[in-house]
Each structure stands twice: as structure tokens, then as C-alpha cells.
Amino acid sequence: MTVPATAAARRLLPRTARGRTVLGWGSALAVGLAALTGGDIRTVTQRSRWKHAVCRESYGSLKSVLIAPRSFFSTITFTKTSNQPPMSITPPQPAPVWNHSADDILRLTKETIAQDREHLDKIGALSASDCNFNSVFVPLASSETSFDSILEPLSFYQNVSPSKELRDASNEAEVLARDYGVEQSMRLDVFQAKVNAEKNIKASGEWEKLSAEDQRLVEKMVLDGTRAGLALPDKERTELTALKKELSQACLEFSKNFNEENGVVSFTEEELKGVPKDVISGYKKRTEDSKELYDVTFKTPDIFPIFKFAENPETRKRAQEAHEARLAINVPLLDKALELRRKIAKLLGYATWADYITEVKMIKSAKGANDFLDDLESKLRPVGLKEREILLAMKEAEHKEKNIPFDGEFYLWDYRYYDRKYIEKTLDLDDSLVKEYFPVSVVVPTILEIYQNLLGVRFEEIKDSSTWHTDVQHFAVWAKDAKDASGFIGYCYLDLFPRGTSSPYFSVWYNFGILNNFQESKYSHAAVWPLLAGYDKADGARSYPLTAMVANLAKPTPDKPALMRHDDVVTFFHEMGHVFHGLLSKTKYSRFHGTSVARDFVEAPSQMLENWCWEPKVLEKMSSHYETKKPLSSDLIEKIIKSRYVNVGLFYLRQLFFAKFDIKVHTDQESDDYTSLWNSLREKISLVKADKPAPGQASFGHITGGYDAGYYGYTYSLVFAADMYATVFKADPLDPSRGAKYAQAILRPGGSREELDSLKDFLGRPPNNEAFIKELFGTVPGANL
């Protein structure tokens, strides 16, 4: 997933693009790919929020021990696109320095807010006759850019810093920024200046002289004020401002709890029977009451192997229930956020929060989203029921063989286990064997090489540069044939490995008693932050973008190097798609840069790129057995590809459950018992039972992290992804000329034009769902969107 920039967060009311055309969905439309955290061999990826080894100076001589993980992980060497020598050109823009103190973060935040307020005061004080494009919209865009360029990196510390002091300061700074965002979004004087300027521009004939992106800037900035409620009477505006601030705080606390979660669930070795030995060897081992226990964190590389491999159903059940309840602290925060959204929507004159949110998306309305989801469910349910029967029969046979009571039910903790067994049985495909062909040290640089060749760029690692942690790798990104500074594209950071209790050194530190103040402190899944946007400066020079990818790839064990499951490979390929969307976009204004597109389109480019991970040539290129160094055999590759749509009904019904829960809680007029709703909807839609209600909604990070009333978009955007891939890339996925076309038509414009215009430019026609339907269900008549 890609994380919204601070500007959007401080406005609170998203600035996503408005599509001109309502997309109509024919009766043939079926489900697409989307995934919450983790999954199986064909899972797309969790993109939840989304989404640490503490080595503070105060530990003195221990610092050299605490930063050791980088040497423990396999060194990743990035392959250049040719035998070109290292770049000797100096980037025209220096990289940021990550040496802030907690005091710096709060001081800079307060100074930036004060400067922004001054700028807005000047604009708000303009007389109506003095309001024009250059006096209102240009300085507003400049102020917005300056604000983001300072505060976005400061806000980022809370997701990655090993220092709790810095994380807390970063979180506090974001509270200040969000509160100020509410304040500035409600400034009637600035809104009136925008309205006056737009009126004067059109009356003077200047409108026709503006570029398309200039015109879009005017339209979007005026729309910001309209949707913020600035047309409301004073009393309602004051109430709305207070509600927005309260909502902002609730969402921020939800996110903070998500980032700081560091729980474990413990098992004996016997209870872990079936879990691969290399996975177990990575768990922290301890003794309690003369019994040896293994502490399993809730991070995907630790907990998901239990869901998939633990033979004892009670082990899987306990792991699943603990995982579902790990963020119960967020239950009241979500209740509060939903209630506040209902009040805000009512004040703004919308029937529901979902109607408010979808108004500026491609789907256009809550009804459109519900119709889309209902149509998908009607097609998937018969398929899912048949698959459930097959897996339930497998469960009955295994329970009979092992003398385990069988109650005829298919539980949440049964799904991944029997899905994996079904794949192994029908395809003779062993997930653990496949993983041996994907060492991190091979996969990551190979994927980078593929992207570099496809998109015509070069990654140059910057050694010994300033970063927020020693594990982080820092790159300058250049055009492949760059000969001078004009070929510079931007900067990229990769923070790929787990830290804290997920580190392979945790048990060593723990046993030495040096972890008393340690705490998990890294975003726990995979996501990309667009830390700096690219834009044209006032003097005509370019300001370059910076993106950061944060992930938690597999860790090495005493027996094996760090290995990736195939779905981890897909995740990494997907997230790198967001990285390049942020790097290769080139817009005049920062607010349109990169992934600043409609939320139900933003995943489409990366979802399209996931297809590379199912192509035989690419799978062979990315794979190298950690011992033999041989690539995947053609037989294994064929099995991996066939596994993509095994149990397709249950897999996508699970995603449909997330989307329908999200839409329901944002269309209901009254509050509900959301724990009960979460569990009942899951049983009804996903066709899996739970033994007791668990507050899974409290860990549904999308709902407070920018995807509220928007989870449907993961599936919705996949129609575009399938169309783009089948139409342009399928014939030759590694062709640089096709990559150049993609970069020019889809990545470069960002949100500076309508998403449908970008799609038409790339496809040579309006998009349709034919490729999507054919991909999942065979040939079915498609309809234009």
C-alpha cells in the first residue's frame, strides 16, 4: 500500500481526484485481487497501515552489539543495469539528514505551522479584486509544498525510529499538524479568496491561458473548501472543526497502537508440531515453570506459519484468537471514529460517510460501491461453497485419521491450513520447498534489476549516508543513460528487515538482560511513504522526490539464510511499484505528484506489476536455491502458476468480507456492536466460523488510515490492472519500450489529470473488464467500464 502524505492528512478531507465518468459495471463483473495481511502462496499482499532494534546512545558500550543485525542479515548487493562504472555525477539535490532530536521535531513542526499560518493570513487578507491565479493559487500551492517537505519526514519517524523518544515526539508532531490541518481547512477567509480568484480568472479570460494542470489546481483547491464545509453557517462550522480534530486524534491513536503493538503468544515445541524447523528456530525460547516455551510475535513471518502448518487445531485456534485480539485497545477508538464520521457526514449534508468519501473517487457513490460488492458476492458464493465442501472433507478425513473430534464445522483457523494442504495434494506443491528458491539476497536485487531495465533507471547505493537505522539502504536514482545532473530522478530508501523482538539477535539480547527498555518500534507490515514529492520550483528548477519502502522480510535462522515465500516476493514487487510511481511521476505541483490519485485507482499500477511474479521467465530469473544456486524448475514454475487461482472463491470472499464490513460501518446510520458485526459478517461472507467473537476490527488498520469506505478499491482497481497488463505487457513483460510507455502514460502524470484519461492514453481505448473476467473465470462477455 502507499501511505497518504501529510497534506492530505492535515486537510483530513481527502484530496483525491474526481473522475468525470461514473464507471458502470456489467453483470459479468466478478471479483479481483486484494489482500489484507499475509496469506498463501498466491496472496497479493497486505497493504495495511497500511503499515526494531533499539540502539540508543544511552546504552553506551552495548551499542556495537545492538546494531549487529545488519551484519547478520545477508548483505544485499544491487545489480547495475549494465557494466557502467559508478555514477560520478553529484545529485543536484542533497539527501535529507536524519539526525533530529525529539526537541527538533517539535520545534520544526511548530515553526512550520506558524509560517504556514502567516502565509494563509496574507492570502486571506486580499481584497476581492486582488485575488487571481498568481496571488492566491500559486502561493497556496507553494505553502502546501513547503509544509509537506518539512513535516512529512518528521511524521515518518513514528513508523521507523528505534528511539521511543523520537517516535513519541513524531506522534505528538503529527497531532499538532493534524489539528492545524483542521484549522486551516476551515478558514473561511482563504476559501473566499479562492472563490474570488476563480471568479476573476474566468471573467478576465485568463482561464483559457492556464495549462490543464493549472486549471486542475484551481478546481481541486476550491473543491477542498466546499467539501470541508466552508459554506456552512458559523455555528455548524465551529462544531465541524471540533469534530474533525476529535476524529483526527482518534485515528492517530489507533495508528500509534498499531505501530507499538509488541505482543506474543507462547507454545511448547509439541504444540508447534508441523511448523517448519527453520521458523521455530527463529522464535525466542524461554523457560517458565520448568517448561520450555517459544514466544511467537504477531508479525507475519512469525505467526502465519502457525496458521498454515501447525497440525494441532488447538494451536492454530489459540494463535488465531490471540492474533485477532492483539489490538483490543483500539475497539473504543474505532467506535469513536465511526460515530464522529456519522456526525461529520450529517453536518456536511451527506447521507453517509461512504457517500462523502466516494464522491471524489472513480466509483462515485456508496451505492456504486455496494452494487459492485454485491455483484461480486453473487458470483463468488457458489464457487466458495464448493471449495469449502472440499476443504471440510479434507478436515474430516484428517481428524478421523488422528482421532481428533470432528464437529462438521470449518473454522477461521482451518482455512489457511487446509488451503495449503489442498495445494500440496492437488499440485504436489510444497510452500516450504518453494521458499528455498527465494533467498532475500537474490530476490531483492533481481527485482530491482528488473525494474531498472524495464523503466530505464539506475539505482546507485549511497554508502555511509544518514538514515534512521543502520539496516536502511539509501539510493540515488538516475535515468539509465544519465550523463549530467539533469538525469537525476530522486532518492529511495529501503528499510526491509524486522527489528526488535523479530530480530534474530533478540534472544541473545534478552538473555543478557539488556532489553529492559526495548519495544517494537517499526511499522509491522509493508508500505511505501512518499516522503518528498517532486514539483517545479518558482525559478523553473526541479525539486526531486524521495520515497521510502518499509517492510519486514524474512529473517535468517541458524540453519538457513533469509528466505521469502512466493507471496512475500509478490508483496515486494507490488510495493516497489509504488516506489516507482513516486519516483517517475513528474508534475508541476506537488499535490498531484505520484500516488496522489483517486484511492480506488492508486493500487492499480502496483497490482498490474504483480503479474510479473507469475510469469515463467521472471520466476526463473528471480529464483536461486540457497544451496544449489539452481533456479526453479519448469515443473515447479508451472505448479506455482497453477496455484494462483486454487480456491479462488474462498480467497476472494475473504477480501469481500473486509470491503463489505468497511462499507457497512460507513453507511449505517446508528452505532453497532462492531465486534459482533465483524464476526457475523465474516461467517456469512467468508464462510468460516469462529468459536467466540474476537475484536478483529481493532486491527483493521485501513479503516483509520486513509482507506475508510475505500477497501473496495483494492478489488475495483484490479480490473484496470488486468486490462493494462493483458493489453500492453502480456506479450513481452520485460520489454523496455512497453515500460517506457507505462511510465509516460500512467506514472508521469500522477494525479495531474483524470485517471480515466491516463488509462485511455495507455490502452488506446477506454478500459474494460474482459481481461479481468477471463483471468479468473475463463472467457465471459465483458462490458466497457
Image (spheres, rainbow, N blue to C red):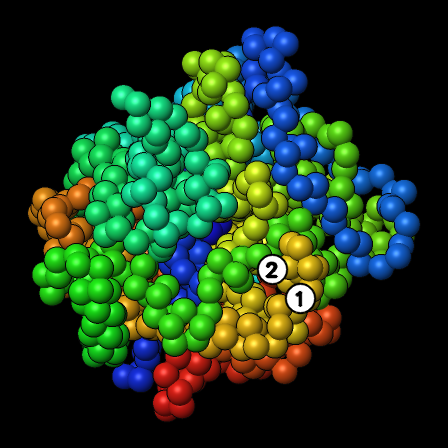
> Which label sits on residue 437?
2
> Which label sits on residue 596?
none
Instruction: Work out whether residue 506 or residue 772 is closer to the camera in this orientation and state it.
Output: 506
Reply above or below: 288 against 218. Answer: above
Q: Within 10 angstroms of label 2, few (less than 14), some, or many (20 or more) residues?
A: many
Q: Within 10 angstroms of label 1, few (less than 14), some, or many (20 or more) residues?
A: some
Earlier residue among tags 2 and 1: 2
On the picture, is 493 further left or further right than 458?
left
Residue 555 visible? The answer is yes
Q: Position of residue 496 (x, y in %)?
A: 57, 42
Q: Secondary structure at mark 2?
A: loop
On the picture, is 400 further left or further right than 728?
left
Distance from label 2 to label 1 (Cα)? 7 Å
Reply above or below: 19 against 113. Answer: below
The residue shown at (40%, 60%) is: 40
Tell me the quarter of the picture where residue 638 sits: bottom right
Tell me the quarter of the picture where residue 257 sits: top left
Per the image, the residue denoted by label 1 is: 631
**Quarter of the image that includes the C terminus:** bottom left
Q: Secondary structure at mark 1?
A: loop
Q: Position of residue 632 (x, y in %)?
A: 62, 68
Q: Position of residue 84 (x, y in %)?
A: 89, 54
Reply above or below: 353 against 514. Answer: below
Reply above or below: 48 against 108. Answer: below
The residue shown at (47%, 34%) is: 502
User: Mark 2: which amino acid?
Assistant: Tyr
Instruction: Work out whether residue 3 or residue 621 is closer to the camera in this orientation and state it.
Output: 621
Tell me the quarter of the picture where residue 448 sits: bottom right
User: Mark 1: which amino acid?
Assistant: Pro
Report the number of numbered marks. 2
The residue shown at (43%, 14%) is: 516
**Callout 2 touching callout 1 (CB < 8 Å):** yes
